[in-house]
Image (cartoon, grey):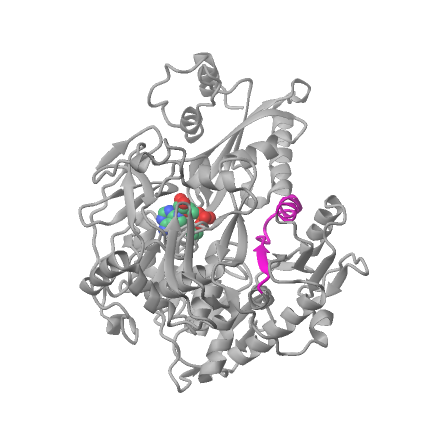
Amino acid sequence: MTTQTETIDSVLTESRVFDPPSPEAVGAPRWLIEDEATYKRMHAESIENPEAFYGSAAKELHWFRPFDKVVEFESPDAVWFKGGTTNLCYNCVDRHVAEGRGNAIGLVWEGEPTDADGAPEVVSYTYSELQAATSRFANALKARGVKPGDVVTIYMGMVPELAIACLACARLGAVHSVIFGGFASHSIVDRVKDADSSIVVTCDGAWRRGKVVPLKANVDEACAALDGAVKTIICLKRCGNEVAWEDGRDVWWHDAVENEPASCACAELDSESTAFILYTSGSTGKPKGIKHTVGGYMVHTYLTSKYVFNLIPGLDEPTRQLPNGRPLSGQVYWCTADVGWITGHSYIVYGVMANGVPTLMYEGAPDCPDCDRFWDIVERHKVTQFYTAPTAIRAFMKWGRAHCEKHDLSSLQVLGSVGEPINPEAWMWYREVIGRGVCPIVDTWWQTETGGHMLTTMPGAHKTKPGSCGVPFFGVDAAICDEDGTEIEGGGGLLCVRRPWPSMLRGIWGDRDRFIETYWQKFDVNGTVSAGKPSPYYFAGDGAQRDADGYFWIMGRVDDVINVSGHRMGTAEVESSLVAHPAVVEAAVVGIPHEIKGTGIAAFCILEPGSKPADAEAAKALKQALRAHVGEQIGAIAKPDLLRFTDALPKTRSGKIMRRLLRDIAAGNEIAGDTTTLEDRTVIDKLLADES
Ligand code: PRX
């Protein structure tokens, strides 16, 4: 099947299909959704009667005050679990204590450094310990004036205190805004300013591949540019690196919690109160603060974690010991993402912890001290669910299967993939080498905006197909439309969601117009948009097609967002960083195929006349300087893989950059498609002839 449109190219030739295994085949206690018929029945019920379906799902969790109504929707505004009050931290931590599981392990953490014998530091928390730790930190925040609704910025490495800080905010009803620790100080400035946040929680440093990333120094630099807007910095001592200190503003985490009581009541929050904001890239230079609310987000992440990963909370009797000697029973779930991304929010912290299955956090890099680190972790902790990104799988493939074969991976029951389309070759390798040729792979399609899984398979219910993310989750009504909003069955089109789901975004922080323009104006369903109203359909920004079995195949973004190593980067963000450099007058950024990252970044720059490099050496130095500049402005993830200098960019007569042509040039492909709208064809000829 081949489809080509201006924005969507896909060649779909994959025909392998794998049946779901029996639970015995992978060592799972049972499958929560046992067969496809059960999925179909439950999915039909969730669509036909969301009140009943989601009403009863929500009641598996604790509500201080029961909700009166499951859902109300007037596009683009949804209200889920109206009138109900609840608390995310209560459901992830206190509920387990209240139900007698206080001594069960809820969080396991492994640090990156290893000692002389090769042993890493392992720390674990029971639910009772998490209750005490989140209470202490919540009290410390309260003592510094944090009130419900205030935005607390969190910029930390992958330490357990990161999860504790998030949960402590949830306890209080404060809104957290987590910034990925790999971002540079400029990114902190933008996000702190946009969220109007006056408190930052950070670490002295973070371990990454044996080196210290100076997080506190990055925060200090950001604060200098923020003119005193940040009143408090709480800093966790992790690496022991030297840090600058401003008395009155800066406080060590251990000092802040030392005298705080280990109890703090969970705030009874309205279901629709804001839980957190998380910034993500869009097609303009300014990142969007995606807003999620308490009740709907909690229910959807809980339910997806449960059914997609087949989470079954611990047996009563401990069955084994953690590497640090503490007893543990049942499953251990590990997601390798960073809590700084939505995957970490939903599927390291909230959704998994709400299920009462221990969540594992690993601090560092997959190749530290060696390329088998992940498999060593799986073996030592007897990980049962493993959730990672295709970019990581491709790196493991490159490093070679010998690293995996050194370890006993037989504890694994379910494998997950997220962040970008997984190429069938990587899918097959994942299944054979990591999954012993039997573990089901759940390829989960979703977004920062959707809060939780939308398209996926379920391990015991569905056949799987390498490269397809499967079918809609319960309550998700996905469709493929053409540009006009007409639904199409065959061929490629635009992925949309036709009705509200509990963890849908509730807005872009401080920018209602952008929220409507970006997600709710693409499809003129029943003439809504032409009548000046938002569309009832959510526009995901992805191209997709559906096969005869109803399985979705994602074909990538249709807007100016590229997906680098499973993380979103707006081309405009990288472009504005490049033009902020004095040598660059204009820049155009496009995605190019990349062996490991999936998509890499190619940048075409027009230089300021006085900055033109005199020779190849000077050009090389300038390219290095520009890459470093983007790294400092946004973060290493945004550094262009390919940089080209040019005198002009290919534009249409109306002045629009023809990115499609730049993509072909950057990828070394022949120029395909129509070039008649080009204003000046010689621009292309020059780019093709000249390699600078
Ligand atoms: O293009 C899709 C891709 O990642 C985008 C969302 O990025 P972000 O908000 O950073 O969230 C990533 C983690 C959920 C989507 O618009 N994407 C995500 N998962 C998949 C995917 N593409 C194909 N298959 C997936 N499983």
Residue shown at 72% from the left, 69% from the top: 256
Residue closest to the eye, 148 or 677: 148
Q: Up-down: is 193 above or below 458?
A: above
Q: Up-down: is 243 above or below 323?
A: above
Q: Which percent across, then down, holds residue 419?
A: 42, 50
Q: Up-down: is 571 above or below 415?
A: above
Residue shown at 48% from the left, 61% from the top: 294
Residue closest to the eye, 646 or 535: 535
- Residue sticking out furthest to the right: 247
Quarter of the rendering containing residue 225: top right
Q: Which percent across, then down, holds residue 194?
A: 62, 45
Residue bounds of the magenta highlight: 173-194
Residue closest to the eye, 439 or 103: 103
- Residue sticking out furthest to the bottom: 317
Residue shown at 30% from the left, 41% from the top: 544
Q: Which percent across, then down, holds residue 529?
A: 37, 34
Q: Up-down: is 203 above or below 469?
A: below
For residue 249, side relative to residue 618 (left or right): right
**Can residue 390 be seen at all in this image of the molecule?**
yes
Q: Which percent across, then down, holds residue 391?
A: 43, 50
**Can residue 391 be seen at all in this image of the molecule?**
no
